[in-house]
Amino acid sequence: MGDSTITEASLKAALTERLNAVHVEVTDMSGGCGQSFTSLIVSPQFAGQTSLKRHRAVNAALKDEIASIHAWSAKCQTPEEWERDKAKNNGEDRPPLDGTVGGHVQGVDA
């Protein structure tokens, strides 16, 4: 990746393009410094794949970006899985924020 600045928008664009994702949510959990991200990626490309294969596909698609940041997590779903989970969660669709305080990694000043 030529630009060394990793942002929510740049990751979202890369995932959408490289994985033919129909929905992508990316959250910077580092308070804006661009070092810790979590995501929800919805792609028909994930159909029939195990969780491990899905994550490997995401990591391969973001190889350069992931090498430049401290922490990365992804929730990978097919469109059908996403719709099912969204219905169970009253329409809420956002990346998992487990281990955060208010969506930010605790102890990070940015």
Image (cartoon, helix red, strand yellow):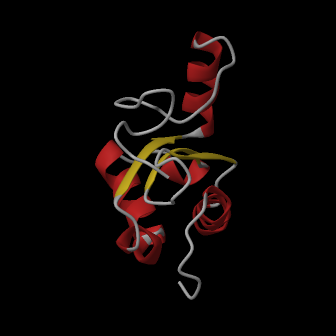
Q: Nearer the viewer, residue 34 or 77?
A: 34
Pinpoint residue 32: horizontal percent, then vertical percent: 56, 53
| Residue farthest to the bottom, as pictured | 2
Q: Residue furthest front?
A: 109
Residue 93, position as x, y percentages in the image: 63, 28
Residue 9: which quarter of the image?
A: bottom right
- Vertically, is 62 above or below 27? below
**In front: 60, or 101?**
101
* Residue at the limit of the structure toward the left, as seen here: 52
State the image coordinates of residue 30 (x, y, percent, origin top left): 46, 49
Q: Return the residue nearer the eye: 51 or 10.
A: 10
Residue 82 in picture, x, y percent from top left: 59, 31
Judging depth in this view, the residue of 60 and 98 nearest the camera is 98
Q: Is residue 81 above or below residue 58?
A: above
In the rendered view, does 74 fall on the left or right side of 82?
left
Which image quadrant is residue 71 in? bottom left
Residue at image position (65%, 60%) is 20
| Vertical side of 97 occupied by 88: above or below | above
Q: Is residue 91 left or right of residue 106?
A: right
At 62% across and 37% down in the image, what residue appears? 79
Q: Is residue 107 above or below residue 93?
A: below
For residue 48, side relative to residue 15 (left or right)? left
Q: Total of numbered circles in the picture?
A: 0
